[in-house]
Image: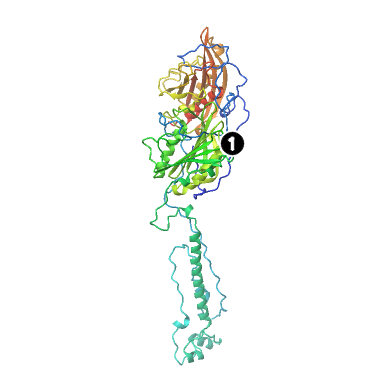
């Protein structure tokens, strides 16, 4: 999840609202083999479905239909997974679950790791001066005489540099040539003409007044007349003075009109105390929140410096771990909107001593949001965000109640500041693109003091894989599995084991996962159990098996082998029957394709009872993944929810780097 910094974006504060960028519309009817995120429509198939642990069986009537509890927020259990839904959240009043007991891990997958920021220079930034010295036009020169040893006055004027490269460089000494009459030797009384004039006369040229010494009148008064050469000298002096004045004026204009906010120039007073990196006036305001939903009246309800035990929490975010940097400044801002759906926003920002500390905390918070461990919240979507600060990502979380409560959470870093914005709403999610634009205005106020990137002219939000997280990278986390009953139940994952004990699964697989592939295969199994749901059968849960094969081809071949066994189960066995099958296809991280199938199998326990299994198997690179659940006829996942669990398991395995 990796804001893509834009080198062209502004670094000054209070940027205007950004252009809308829509989430791609990928909705539409798809065939049964459509790509995974669209799901498959199973509305016309009324065959019972089931799945269970091998050690647990429940007597059920094979003729009774499955009465799976639809996933809240999805009234039509078709198995279709939304491509580009809208987004939501809930009022934040300190009710968000506490910190998890399954510590989040920093992302290990290329796609899961936060956007690698462009290097940020903490030194003050400067804006190149844009000056344009004005060169005044020289006055028209006198007619240029010709003759030996004549010096052009134009050459003298060209020596004046009136456009210095650096406006801050010391001003060049003003070199004004002395008038010629102050430097020439006083001729003797008997010298009525100068040497050059006498030469010209002997050569037959007429004498030029003022160029050959004193005239007769000058000899009588003792002062030389103001000849043409003296006029040229005065003109050159005037040009030089005008050029210096123009240089001073242009430098002054540049100095007072430069943008000190964008450049980050220090105060003119070296002893002045810089402002804080983070303050209350940099947080989300009711005016900014109107970008999220302009139809509501937003009201500020909380403005707090620092946090304590009674402070409200961002969804799925707990206290920082002991090995994480401690923020120097923390600000909280709460807002509510009018209406009956309890729309509310909670904005938190933390300032750290260095960019490196802020980057470390960004990765920690990313893992928390990606796993949502040991909470009743379901990580429904991952969101790739670009154009916001140095790094940015998002998730959409759902609390399955009688009316689902949605939380759209954004995580962004600009320089030394890490910010979170959680917008909650009951019934339907808020628009995430609008939420990005609103947070972008706050980021523009923080980016200057934090020495980070501001908001780009164009931002985007796309559905992606949730950030990697959880204590077991590559495997499902508790936040990846939705509740079965609305308003109750929490998923917990047991520690992974190297010993696989699911044996042949639902009895249709016809393989032993503990030995298939030989000794060169690495095996891992983890079991997830549903707690605190009174309607759940004993030990209801999901088994996940991961086999690391010798190659991607070996993993694909095993999927094809077991799929053949599953589809022929009805004719091969007398005790088990496969009643539903559909393909699974979706992209994972780094272009790795996830491809396989999901099934419903009914297996006879005795003459009077059947055991139902939900099964999923697929490959991703050289990984083979197998899922099995043990529902009953009255307590089961919807097809859509089961497809979502399988897809998430495939996405998680592609985040694992060996």
Q: Residue at x 59, y 36 (%)?
A: 24
Left of 141 or right of it: where is 515? left
Depth check: give the residue in front, 420 or 124.
420
Q: Residue furthest left?
A: 322
Q: Which residue lies furthest to the top in this view?
A: 607
- In the rendered view, tell whether residue 323 sits above or below residue 446: above
Residue 567 lies in quadrant: top right
Q: Where is residue 375 in the image (x, y as percent from the top left)?
A: 45, 28
Depth check: give the residue in front, 554 or 618.
618
* Picture colour scheme: rainbow
Q: How many labels does the image show?
A: 1
Left of 467 or right of it: where is 271? left
Q: Is mark 1 on a helix, strand or loop?
A: loop
Q: Where is residue 315 in the image (x, y as percent from the top left)?
A: 47, 33
Depth check: give the residue in front, 13 or 515.
13
Kindly identify which residue carries mark 1: 24
- In the rendered view, tell whether residue 519 sits above or below residue 37: above
């Amino acid at each position: 999840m990796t804001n893509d910094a834009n080198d062209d974006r502004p670094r000054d504060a209070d940027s205007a609202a950004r252009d809308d960028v829509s989430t791609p519309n990928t909705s539409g009817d798809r065939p049964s083999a459509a790509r995974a995120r669209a799901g498959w429509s199973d509305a016309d198939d009324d065959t019972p479905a089931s799945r269970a642990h091998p050690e647990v069986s429940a007597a059920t009537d094979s003729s009774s239909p499955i009465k799976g509890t639809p996933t809240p927020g999805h009234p039509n259990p078709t198995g279709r997974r939304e491509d580009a839904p809208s987004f939501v959240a809930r009022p934040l009043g300190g009710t968000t679950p506490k910190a998890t007991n399954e510590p989040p891990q920093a992302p290990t997958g290329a796609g899961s790791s936060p956007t690698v920021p462009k290097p940020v220079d903490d030194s003050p930034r400067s804006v190149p001066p844009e000056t344009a010295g004005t060169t005044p036009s020289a006055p028209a020169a006198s007619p240029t005489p010709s003759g030996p040893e004549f010096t052009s006055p134009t050459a003298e004027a060209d020596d004046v540099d009136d456009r210095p490269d650096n406006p801050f460089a010391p001003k060049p000494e003003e070199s004004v040539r002395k008038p010629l009459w102050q430097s020439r030797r006083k001729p003797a009384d008997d010298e009525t003409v100068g040497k050059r004039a006498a030469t010209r006369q002997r050569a037959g040229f007429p004498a030029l007044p003022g160029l050959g010494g004193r005239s007769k009148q000058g000899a009588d008064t003792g002062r030389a007349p103001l000849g043409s050469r003296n006029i040229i000298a005065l003109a050159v002096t005037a040009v030089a003075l005008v050029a210096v004045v123009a240089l001073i004026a242009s430098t002054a204009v540049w100095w007072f009109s430069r943008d000190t906010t964008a450049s980050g120039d220090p105060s003119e007073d070296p002893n002045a105390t810089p402002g804080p990196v983070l303050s209350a006036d940099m947080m989300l305001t009711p005016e900014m929140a109107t970008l999220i939903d302009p139809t509501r009246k937003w009201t500020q309800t909380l403005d707090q410096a620092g946090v304590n035990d009674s402070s409200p929490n961002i969804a799925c975010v707990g206290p920082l771990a002991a090995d994480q940097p401690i923020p120097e400044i923390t600000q909280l801002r709460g807002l509510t909107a009018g209406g009956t759906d309890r729309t509310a926003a909670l904005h938190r920002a933390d300032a750290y001593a260095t960019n490196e500390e802020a980057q470390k905390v960004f990765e920690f918070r990313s893992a928390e949001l990606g796993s949502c461990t040991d909470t009743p919240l379901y990580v429904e979507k991952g969101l790739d965000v670009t154009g916001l600060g140095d790094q940015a990502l998002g998730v959409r979380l759902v609390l399955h109640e009688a009316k689902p409560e949605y939380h759209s959470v954004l995580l962004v870093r600009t320089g030394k500041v890490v910010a979170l914005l959680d917008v909650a709403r009951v019934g339907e999610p808020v628009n995430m693109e609008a939420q990005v634009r609103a947070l972008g205005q706050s980021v523009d106020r923080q980016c200057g003091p934090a020495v980070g990137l501001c908001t780009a002219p164009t931002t985007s939000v796309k559905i992606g894989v949730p950030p990697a997280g959880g204590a077991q990278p590559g495997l499902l986390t508790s936040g990846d599995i939705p509740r079965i009953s609305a308003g109750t139940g929490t998923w917990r994952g047991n520690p992974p084991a190297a010993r696989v004990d699911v044996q042949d699964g639902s009895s249709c697989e016809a393989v032993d996962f503990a030995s298939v592939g030989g000794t060169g295969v690495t095996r891992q199994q983890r079991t997830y159990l549903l707690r605190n749901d009174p309607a759940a059968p004993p030990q209801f849960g999901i088994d996940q098996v991961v086999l690391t094969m010798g190659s991607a081809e070996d993993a694909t071949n095993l999927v094809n082998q077991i799929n053949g066994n599953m589809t022929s189960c009805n004719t091969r066995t007398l005790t088990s029957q496969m009643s539903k099958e559909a393909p699974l296809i979706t992209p994972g991280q780094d272009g790795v394709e996830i491809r396989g199938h999901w099934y419903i199998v009914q297996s006879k326990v005795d003459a009077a009872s059947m055991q139902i299994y939900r099964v999923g198997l697929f490959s991703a690179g050289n990984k083979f993944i197998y899922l099995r659940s043990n529902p009953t006829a009255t307590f089961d996942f919807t097809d859509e929810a089961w497809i979502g669990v399988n897809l998430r398991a495939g996405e998680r395995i592609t985040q694992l780097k060996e």
